[in-house]
Amino acid sequence: MSVHVQNTRMTTTRVRQMKQKGEKITMLTSYDFTLARLADEAGVDILLVGDSASNIVCGNQYTLPITLDEMIFLAKGVVRAAQHSLVVVDMPFGSYQVNDDEAVRNAIRILKESGADAVKLEGGQEIAGAIRRMIQAGVPVCGHLGLTPQSVNQFGGYGIRAKEDAEAEKLIADAKLLDQAGCFCIVLEKIPAALAQRVTSEISCPTIGIGAGNGTDGQVLVLHDMLGLNEGFKPKFLRQFAHLAEEIHKAVGDYVTAVKDCSFPSAEESY
Ligand code: KIV
């Protein structure tokens, strides 16, 4: 196992410097203390308390139902675990779209109550004003363009985005706007690799890709997906670095058998 643990805590400034130095940035989702501690110890640069918790933790079909209070609750555990990694928290659907004042208030709530380092929001020009105000207020912001799952009802699914010229041009313009607004990085989800590479070369802040090819400044995956815990989910962009669902099925099955046949607990496991 190779471990790349940094000696000091990751900061948004260091994330920016990594792009300048050509050092790839690693981001993984995290929703609880135990797995966050393992990911932090293994050297991941950024832990994202993603609103994919709505699917992974709560079992919802979409990311939309998860609330601000629920995101803050999850983020607290991740923050307690993070010794090295930067912790970024997704602003859930409805917490930043109504108006800029509410958006800034909710972003501040996330940092104040969870102790996280930064927030992430989905969208471009429509939310650039809110992002500017958050950054002025001292809240570091990660952008998110391309497939933005909170807009699933508008998109009508989770297909690849920005294949056509008009949407690709809007995405490039949005990325430049978020960069100028002061985002310290931007997630690019499920867009053509050539487009992601172009955006990466035309903006100063780092890009972090998921299903966006190898030309971005970093990569992000959903931890449960890359650990092979989410058995049915195998899109083209996903590499499973482990197959933990199989191991868990076996371990739990072995436990059930051992209890039923009275071989657990043994005399050595009893007081
Ligand atoms: O919520 C999430 O998991 C995300 C990643 C897919 C980037 O936003």
Image (cartoon, grey):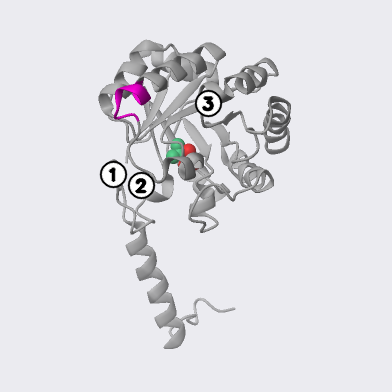
Could you tell me which residue is drawn at 62 percent across and 44 percent down?
71
Could you tell me which residue is drawn at 63 percent across and 41 percent down?
80
* Image coordinates for residue 198, horizontal then vertical, percent: 31, 17
Q: Are marks 1 and 3 in contact (CB under 8 Å)?
A: no
Circle 3: residue type: Cys
Magenta residue span: 162-168
Dot placed on the residue nearer the N-terminal end, 3 or 2: 3
Q: Is residue 22 visible?
A: no
Q: Look at mark 1 in the image and give the residue it sits on.
A: 239
Circle 2: residue type: Met
* Image coordinates for residue 50, horizontal then vertical, percent: 52, 41
Q: Look at mark 2 in the image and give the residue it sits on.
A: 226
Give the vertical position of 192 relative to 133 (above or below): below
Q: How many marks?
A: 3
Question: Which numbered circle lies on residue 142?
Answer: 3
* Image coordinates for residue 250, horizontal then vertical, percent: 35, 70
* Image coordinates for residue 154, horizontal then vertical, percent: 47, 40
Could you tell me which residue is drawn at 32 percent across and 41 percent down?
1
Q: Is residue 202 visible?
A: yes
Q: Are marks 2 and 1 in contact (CB under 8 Å)?
A: yes
Image quarter where the C terminus lies is bottom right
Dot placed on the residue nearer the N-terminal end, 1 or 3: 3
Foreground disc of the pair 1, 3: 3
Please, what secondary structure does the residue beneath circle 1 have? loop
In which image quadrant can residue 24 be found?
A: top left
Give the vertical position of 199 relative to 102 (above or below): above
Circle 1: residue type: Arg
